[in-house]
């Protein structure tokens, strides 16, 4: 149908074209009709491609805008997820710090208890060793005194003499 209309319009332009310039009259009407026919043909031929171009361009722009919006939503979602992970990490770090402080306190108390126990044991051993050394010294002193008494002649010693001998040995 469109081809028939275009053919009729072109045929009309050919038929109405005249040689009025040779006769000396003006052909303004025929030229106006020819221009209107030419403009109609241009509109008919170019209207659909131009309309399709602008519709396609609008659709492309809308699609690009939608992709940008989707990327924006995705980046916001990733940002929120990252912030959530940061909050979780901060919470975990504070819990870990508290746990480490508690464990440090327990270990410190345990070490102090062990040190106190070791100190008591060393003190008991020291006291026992001192007691043992005292007994050893007393035995040696008694042994020396007895040797001196035995070597000194067998005379009976009274308490005062025995005390004097012991004082000399101890001093």
Image: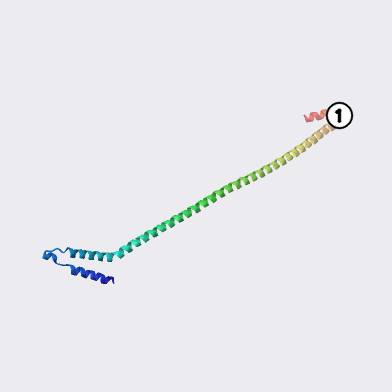
Decide if residue 26 is on the left or right side of residue 89.
Answer: left
Decide if residue 101 is on the left or right side of residue 124.
Answer: left
Res. 164 image quadrant: top right
Res. 33 image quadrant: bottom left
Residue 50: where, in percent of width, then height? 30, 63
| Figure disc tally | 1
Name the residue beneath numbered marker 1: 159
Q: Quadrant of the N terminus?
A: bottom left
Residue 8: where, in percent of width, then height? 23, 71
Decide if residue 143 is on the left or right side of residue 3.
Answer: right
Q: Residue at 83% of width from left, 29% of height from top?
A: 163
Q: Quick one: 33 or 144, which is closer to the camera? A: 33
Q: Is residue 29 above or below residue 143?
A: below
Q: Quadrant of the C terminus?
A: top right
Res. 9 image quadrant: bottom left
Give the structural element (helix, strand or loop) at label 1.
helix
Q: Quick one: 27 or 74, which is closer to the camera? A: 27
Residue 101: where, in percent of width, then height? 61, 45
Residue 30: where, in percent of width, then height? 18, 65
Q: Residue at 77% of width from left, 37% of height from top?
A: 131
């Amino acid at each position: 149908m469109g081809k028939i209309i275009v053919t009729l319009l072109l045929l009309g332009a050919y038929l109405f074209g005249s040689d009025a310039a040779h006769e000396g009259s003006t052909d303004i009407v025929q030229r106006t009709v020819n221009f209107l026919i030419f403009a109609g043909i241009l509109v008919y031929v170019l209207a659909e491609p131009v309309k399709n171009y602008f519709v396609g361009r609008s659709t492309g722009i809308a699609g690009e805008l939608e992709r940008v919006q989707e990327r924006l939503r995705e980046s916001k979602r990733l940002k929120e997820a990252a912030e959530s992970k940061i909050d979780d990490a901060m919470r975990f770090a504070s819990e870990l710090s508290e746990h480490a402080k508690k464990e440090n306190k327990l270990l410190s108390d345990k070490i102090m208890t062990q040190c106190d126990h070791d100190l008591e044991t060393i003190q008991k051993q020291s006291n026992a060793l001192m007691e043992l050394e005292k007994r050893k010294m007393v035995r040696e002193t008694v042994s020396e005194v007895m040797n001196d008494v035995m070597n000194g002649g067998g005379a009976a010693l009274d308490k005062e003499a025995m005390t004097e001998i012991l004082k000399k040995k101890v001093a």
